[in-house]
Amino acid sequence: MMIKVWRTLLSAFVLLLLFGINSFAQSDSESDSITTKFRGFKNVKFAGHQNVVTMSPVPFFVGQIPFCGEIRLTYERMVSHNQSLSLGLSYNYPSIFLLVLPAIANPNSATLKNYSLRGGRVTLAYRYYPLKSKTAPGGLFFGPYGSFNFVKIKERKGNDASYDLVYYADACVVAGYQIPLRKGVYMEFMGGLGYRMNKVYEYDGRTKTSATHDYYIVKLPFANNFKVLLQMNICYGF
């Protein structure tokens, strides 16, 4: 099942990436002068900065998987004066709501400390910047975005090796804009629509059996696989 999820996500992302590059590269090469074409990282004329590191404060409290907090760091590299590729890595952990709310509701039955909850996330993205902006790296952008997120839940002192593995996979087309705050620092807003696949893999160590189910906090008739993406990020360009 995990292999099928990776194949679905990567296939969707690659198709979106190829479509974006083929569409934008042709028009870009016709309209720009030869001095702005890609000649290697050291010779490219960039709209802003060549490298960008991005973090978001929101996932610290509630990440993509609702009961997880998420520390996410994304590195973006400009590959021409108006195109970039980015890779994001995240670490999942119990969100602050899971740590606080059970103890408030019923201190005697708060059992979260008896469970291990760990996971991570990988994101890939391609961006095209159509405006000749001096912001880092270029103001308005759009392109494909793919993500795979997972968390493994297991009883800390359990001796039957039972666990649940929750994973989210999605591929979207996104658009966003960057607002400069100070030199090298800016705020980024991003949104998009696409496809998602949310699953939970349950393994029973006592019976040695397993099962996989859909996993949606809110089920939408005929639209469970419809993905809406919204992000607010703080970025630093250099």
Image (cartoon, helix red, strand yellow):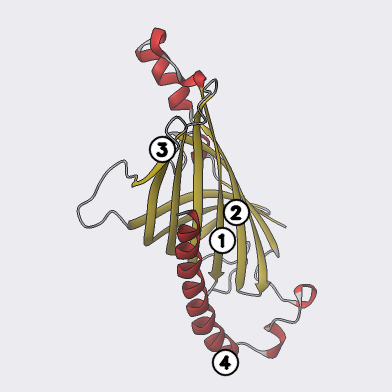
Cβ atoms under marks 1 and 3 closer than 8 Å? no
Residue closest to the eye, 31 or 163: 163
Label drawn at residue 148: none
Secondary element at tag 1: strand
The residue to which callout 3 is attached is: 66
The kind of residue tagged 2 is: Gly
Q: Which residue reaches farthest front?
A: 207
Cβ atoms under marks 1 and 2 closer than 8 Å? yes
Secondary element at tag 4: helix
| Image location of residue 15, percent across then percent down | 47, 75
* Front tag of 1 and 4: 1
Secondary element at tag 3: loop
* Front tag of 4 and 3: 3
Residue 142 shows up from this direction? no
Q: Earlier in the sequence, mark 2 or mark 4?
A: 4
Residue 120 shows up from this direction? yes
